[in-house]
Image (cartoon, rainbow, N blue to C red):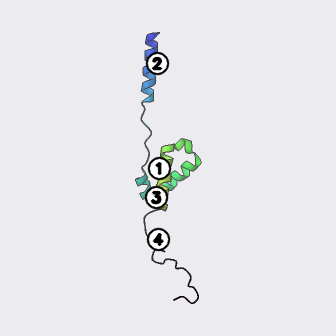
Amino acid sequence: MNRLFIMAAATLMLAACGKPAPFESVESLVGNLERLKELRAACKADHAKIGDAQCNAVAEATRRRFMRPTPSPYANDPVRPPARDGAP
């Protein structure tokens, strides 16, 4: 009985030590728009199959592409307040 318990515990510990599934990094997805589109569609279709880690990386890559640190086209054209009557 004691041996059976030890063997069962050892088997469970070995099964729990599996490696996590590899996934593509955010940086690689930011640079590869076609792969990013594929994974976005796959996450939308079956999030559970793709996995949380990969879908979170896809979401972060999409955010980084959208909010990239390029200057705004309106940066040199600030909105000025309307002129008042009689004011210089």
x and y percent of residue 1 in the render? 47, 9
Q: Residue at x 47, y 60 (%)?
A: 65
Label 3 – label 4 distance at C-alpha: 15 Å
Rendered image: mark on residue 64: 3
Disc with the residue nearer the chain's start (4 vs 2): 2
Residue indicated by mark 1: 57
Disc with the residue nearer the chain's start (3 vs 2): 2
Considering only vertical position in the picture, is 23 above or below 82? above
Q: Amino acid at mark 1?
A: Ala
Q: Residue at x 42, y 21 (%)?
A: 10
Of marks 3 and 4, the one in the foreground: 4
Q: Amino acid at mark 2?
A: Ala
Residue indicated by mark 2: 8
Q: Residue at x 55, y 52 (%)?
A: 41
Rendered image: mark on residue 7: none
Label 1 packing within 10 angstroms: few (<14), some (14-19), many (20+): many
Label 1 – label 3 distance at C-alpha: 10 Å
